[in-house]
Amino acid sequence: MKVLLATRNQKKLGELRRILDPAVAVELVGLDDVDGYPEAPETEASFAGNALLKAREGVRYTGLPTIADDSGLTVDALNGMPGVLSARWAGKHGDDDANLELVLAQLADVPDARLGAAFECAAALVLPSGAEHIALGTMPGRLIRERRGDGGFGYDPIFVAAGHDRTNAELTPEEKDAISHRGKAFRALAQVLANAI
Ligand code: ITT
């Protein structure tokens, strides 16, 4: 059975495929596989609000069970920002380099002891019946001031998860999935999906 992942982010899609595939026998398609998809802006103030918004749109447009997530980095010293604005913190949606550099610049005078941060994810599943499910996941950790590693995406090169020495960008995809905010949220949602279809 086909399930839509309402995202164009190929790296995110890859992460979600690795997580969901073993759990449920479904064919996952992304927004690039749907002709003329009318993508609406993420206007909600919470990760859960945006995830639900995107999943509802997916069902409305395709009629397929739709999973969507909204995720981002919350930095203690920035009062939880960039938060829902993580993907466009420097102004242009998806400019990972500029977003990361802006966060580093904003933290230049913040002492190392106050570089606590977390990745957060809300994952939503909306079914054609109208049933809605939400799962949340958090990965606590801290930021470092220089990039390390080539893996992952977004803020991964400057994020070290709690209990780890390597940045997220230095972890293998499997290592990251096992501890990531999205891994946690999607493993929970995969159970719901398996029971629902
Ligand atoms: P879709 O909305 O199409 O799903 P997106 O890339 O815009 O894709 P989000 O709205 O969820 O995704 O924004 C997430 C942003 O938060 C993303 O652009 C990164 O900057 C950051 N982010 C989220 N998860 C991350 C992760 O695992 N590693 C690094 N950065 C992450």
Image (tube, rainbow, N blue to C red):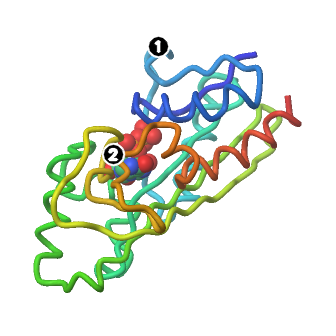
Question: Which mark is drawn over residue 170?
Answer: 2
The residue positioned 67% from the left and 25% from the top of the image is 21
Q: Secondary structure at mark 1?
A: loop
Q: Earlier in the sequence, mark 1 or mark 2?
A: 1
Q: Quadrant of residue 103?
A: bottom left
**Residue where numbered disc 1 is placed:** 35
Q: CA distance from mark 1 to mark 2?
A: 36 Å
Is residue 22 rendered to the left or right of residue 7?
right
**Mark 2 Cα within 10 Å, few/some/many (few <14, many 20+)?**
some
In this rendered view, identify the residue nearer to me: 45 or 121: 121
- What SS does tag 2 mark? helix
Quadrant the C terminus occupies: top right
Residue 104: x and y, percent? 16, 66
Question: Furthest residue to the front?
Answer: 165
Q: Give percent across and percent down for residue 45.
A: 46, 66
Identity, as a three-letter code, of the amino acid under mark 1:
Asp
Name the one closer to the observer, 176 or 28: 176
Task: Residue 97: tell me if it is visible.
Answer: yes
